[in-house]
Image (cartoon, helix red, strand yellow):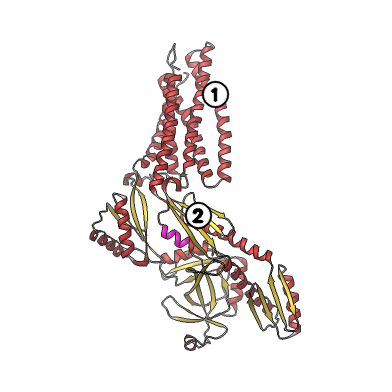
Amino acid sequence: MLNRYPLWKTLMVAFIVAIGALYATPNLYGEDPAVQVSGLRGVEANVATLDTIKANLTDNNIAFTGIVLENGQVLTRFNNTEDQLKARDVLDDKLGKKYSVALNLTPATPDWLAVIGGTPMKLGLDLSGGVSFLMEVNMKEAINKAKVGMVSDFRGDLRNEKIRYRSVKEDGNAIVVKFRKVEDLEKAQSLLKKRYRDLLLRTDEDTLTINAQMTDQMLKEIREYALQQNITIIRNRVNELGVAEPLVQRQGKKHIVIELPGVQDTAKAKEILNATATIEFRLVDTEGDLSAAINGRIPASSILLKEKDGKPILLKKRIMLTGDHITDAKSGFDEYSRPQVNISLDSAGGSKMSNGTKSNIGKPMATVFIEYKPTDRRDPEGNLIFEKVQEVISVATIQSRLGKSFRITGAGSQTEAHNLALLLRAGALIAPITIVEERTVGPTLGAENVQLGFQAILMGFGLVFIFMIIYYRAFGVVANMALGANLVLIIGVMSLIPGATLTLPGMAGIVLTVGMAVDANVLIFERIREEIREGKSIQQAIHQGYDAAFSTIIDANITTLIAALILFAVGTGPVKGFAVTLSIGILTSMFTSVIGTRAVVNAVWGGKSLKKLSI
């Protein structure tokens, strides 16, 4: 019989629409203003922290609707933003510098929906609010780091070739190498010319020195590399934070723009993004006099640092390995359930570690954690001055020759080990960066954008709705039902997909999808009218209308889908947000406008003897 769906197919359509409506439901509940308290630098919030927060809020007569401790963080919900802001100020003042206190908007989804994975759509920076950073790369420090690396490389190359030298030192943008004999000078000149073709070498036989000067081109390349590498590393760190639809891009010669929509912990994001962290491995100087070093008489080949508990320790100045060679780092536990970080090196790093440890088995090796922290001072060129902070996080005896994989312990708590692994895995920044501008898009502005966007969607939907009823009558009602189901499915799918984010351009994609969804029904209905005018029966006209128009609908939607996928692949930020909603809208509209409307048409008019059709 023409135009009859089997029961299972009708139920399938109803089930899919019902599931879409179910997962679109969390978007109706909105969000609660909240304050999130989380520990800094390895500190975890605990039950005592939760009790302190409760006591402070109660003492200041600030009402809260809920408070929960999860994953080392305390999240407190409030009825309104006024109480939220008061609570933030009170807790920020009372909890000290060990905790970050950040404003947050947390979904008000009921527990029964959350249990089955129901969550509202993630909104972009323009809709949900969020934070935007303008960060400046310290190019002077990038050049200094490159010079330090070259000094170390020079010393290593000369030692490996058994060429004796008096000293290797920095001098401005040059490296000066001094020798005792002319023979050593000539050997070194030949070696350095082969290995460092980018440097301008000048030899002075009278003073037995080689001056290796950085060219302007080399300095330009160092700055460019520092900027591009920092952008790559920041992108990795943002991915580790799990922020949806982030924007990380270059601005000018030394600035980077970062946008984090709907970020939940601003302080945590700043701590991770702004950290210039790496590690170094050095041998402990067991022969030096620690007491003399504490009193200021430090051996020329050693440096004096402190361990985490403040205990001084004397280390060799020579660096066995830096964090630049780390390819992966994961936190875990050792056999005694102590936090540790498992480290993997690249081939060059594995070779250095192997060569450095094979002759030092049985000797203690220190792991030095290094951070560059911004100060309030600037140099004559206007660059922010950073303070280099070094801390020995572990000292372990070298039991055997190490290779490309090994572990370090003593990182502190599991949270601190996790953060250290995150920073090392994402990469050490080539040069320190600092936030020179922080712009927050408040939830009020975001809510206004959401309201205007939904007004545009509803206006477009309403106009199409009226046109379809006037022009296609009863069949127009069916098309409008499909249009409503299409909007519900788009929202449901966007809520289900982990990485999908709705932006203001994404709303434009939904408006465009409304028109495209109706376009498929227009093609079908016009073909049905044409078949009726040619004298075919009502059932034949309906059957032929859907079958004949299907190939045209498929072709039109596939070409649009290809364009949307290309936009998604090559676009960034708003363009990608538009492509996501457009792609999802094309797929859902194909389902609702063809399969969905046919299910309704078959149920109402299919298989019946009809002389007229309201179309």
Asked if residue 262 is positioned above or below residue 307 in the image, the reply reads above
Of 387 and 43, which appears nearest the observer? 387
As displayed, is residue 467 above or below residue 591? above
Within 10 Å of disc 2 (Cα), the crowding (few <14, some 14-19, many 20+) is many
On the image, the x and y values in percent for residue 562 come to: 58, 37
Q: Residue at x 53, y 15 (%)?
A: 531
Q: Which residue is mark 2?
A: 258
Q: CA distance from mark 2 to mark 1?
A: 47 Å
Query: Dot 1: what SS?
Result: helix
Residue 537 image position (x, y, % from top left): 49, 13
Query: 10 Å neighbourhood of mark 1: few (<14), some, or many (≥20)?
Result: many
Q: Nearer the viewer, residue 175 or 184?
A: 175
Task: Judge whether residue 247 is colored magenta.
Answer: no
Residue 18 image point, x, y percent: 38, 35
Taking the image as shown, residue 481 lies to the left or right of residue 209, namely left
What's the amino acid at mark 2? Ile
Of mark 2 and mark 1, the one earlier in the sequence is: 2
